Amino acid sequence: MNLLMVGIGAGFGALLRYALTQLGKIVWPTRPWMTMVINVTGAFVAGWVSVMGLPNHLHLLIATGLLGGYTTFSTLHVDTLGLINRKLWPQVFGYYVGTVILGVLAASLGIWLGR
């Protein structure tokens, strides 16, 4: 049952990430900002869910599955390398460092609101 909860959540999270990534290519065709939006909103929801006291099966569905499929640590790094290769140094800093700082702030906000 646990594997099923994670799998269902991950499938929906990946579909949501894909849809938002496609939207990001329209809104910001030459920049990976939607990945930042996805990771920061995922951090917020993860923080919130972590303190909600959900039953284990719902926590697995949302935190491990949905948010695991929705957020993307690997794409953050590939996108950062793309910006580095194009020598877009202000964007490298804003994107990478911004994602990390905003992610921590978003998770903290989610925890604070969840309490």
Image: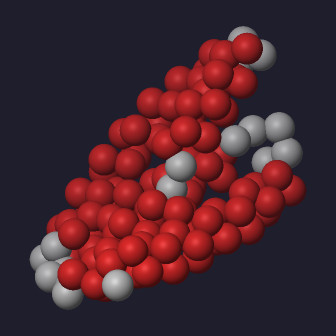
Q: How many marks?
A: 0
Comparing 16 with 60, the one in front is: 60
Comparing 43 with 95, the one in front is: 43
Q: Indicate the position of residue 110 as horizontal and vertical percent values.
A: 28, 67
80 shown above or below 44? above
* Colour basis: secondary structure
Asked whether the viewer can see residue 110, the reply is no
5 shown above or below 93? below
- Looking at the rendered image, the quarter that the C terminus falls into is bottom left
Left or right of residue 109: residue 97: right
Asked whether the viewer can see residue 74, the reply is yes
Please identify the quarter of the rendering in which residue 53 is found: bottom left
Please identify the quarter of the rendering in which residue 113 is found: bottom left
89 shown above or below 61? above
Tell me the residue at 56%/31% (across/down): 77
Tell me the residue at 61%/65% (across/down): 14
Comparing 44 with 15, the one in front is: 15
Tell me the residue at 64%/71% (across/down): 16
Comparing 45 with 89, the one in front is: 45
- Looking at the rendered image, the quarter that the N terminus falls into is bottom left
86 shown above or below 63? above
Q: Indicate the position of residue 35 as horizontal and vertical percent values.
A: 61, 49
Q: Indicate the position of residue 95 as horizontal and vertical percent values.
A: 56, 34
Q: Indicate the position of residue 96 as horizontal and vertical percent values.
A: 51, 31
Tell me the residue at 46%/54% (across/down): 40
